[in-house]
Image (cartoon, rainbow, N blue to C red):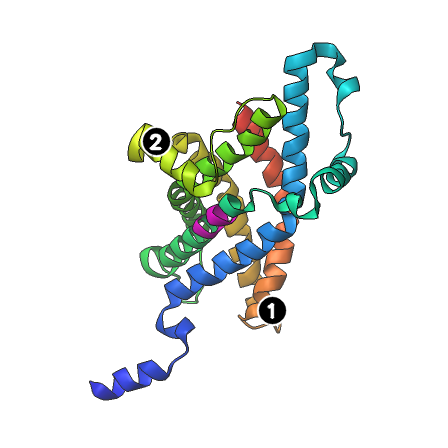
Amino acid sequence: MSVPEDEERLLPLAQRWPRASKFLLSGCAATVAELATFPLDLTKTRLQMQGEAALARLGDSARESAPYRGMVRTALGIVQEEGFLKLWQGVTPAIYRHIVYSGGRMVTYEHLREVVFGKTEDKHYPLWKSVIGGMMAGVVGQFLANPTDLVKVQMQMEGKRKLEGKPLRFRGVHHAFAKILAEGGVRGLWAGWVPNIQRAALVNMGDLTTYDTVKHYLVLNTPLEDNIMTHGLSSRLTASILPVLSNLQEAFSKE
């Protein structure tokens, strides 16, 4: 018994703890992506909140009084009036959310594929299993991330309160967690979880299913091997359908 244990200690961490490694790698990738795209998200949110606040105050004349128009002018206005780093204001809860969500869904999908459903004898993973696995992974990932998602939305709403001249409710991310927990208990952290997991199930049904199908096709029909290069290429090809999935997500959330 001592020999296998000694050999196991010499293995890379990714082979010794594959699930934990997958969670960490997915979380790190999500963090990098969130840091790169958060200014766009903040600009979009600022435009939306500005429009809502202006309509509440001025009605039809709100469009003429809006200080920012368009994504570029809004971003430049934030930099000039508040500072460059303000483009990442509120990024902390977004990072928390994506680490939990991305790590949770990827680990769940890998477990379902390798342990629960399993592959066929020729190492093929049927499409119907990939669809079900993607939906279930989205449900689990979003359910785990719902508290962080809730705090992210609440922190974004603070910007609207500031535009409306109302006092802020939270001093920071951890204060928001504590206040929501104190007012609503543990169940309060999962407010709105049902529509969130429904949306995540639909998005991941397309996202993870497409990614796994594309990767499997590349490995079987091209000289590419199952490595990081193939994973990256599969992700890029999968990203081509993300606008369609995003439109479906937005339409579903409005119903």
The residues bearing labels 2 and 1 have C-alpha atoms spaced at a distance of: 42 Å
Q: Residue at x 39, y 61 (%)?
A: 119
Q: Viewer-proximal residue, 191 or 131?
A: 191
SS category of the residue bearing label 1: helix
Q: Which SS does the magenta portion mostly show?
A: helix
Q: Is residue 106 above or below residue 203?
A: below
The image quadrant of residue 29 is: bottom right
Q: Give the quadrant of residue 237.
A: bottom right
Q: Taking 210 as reference, is 163 above or below it?
A: above
Q: Residues within 10 Å of mark 2 (few under 14, many from 20)?
A: some
Q: Which residue is mark 2?
A: 188
- Local secondary structure at mark 2: helix
Region in magenta? 95-100
Q: Is residue 2 visible?
A: yes
The image shows residue 197 at horizontal and vertical percentages of 42, 37
- Percent across and percent down for residue 85 are 66, 48
**Residue 190 x/y as whole percent:** 36, 34
The answer to whether marks 2 and 1 mark residues whose Cβ atoms lie closer than 8 Å is no
Regarding residue 189, the answer to whether it shows in the image is: no
**Residue at the spot 69% in from the left edge and 11% down from the top edge:** 59
- According to the picture, the residue beneath numbered tag 1 turns out to be 229
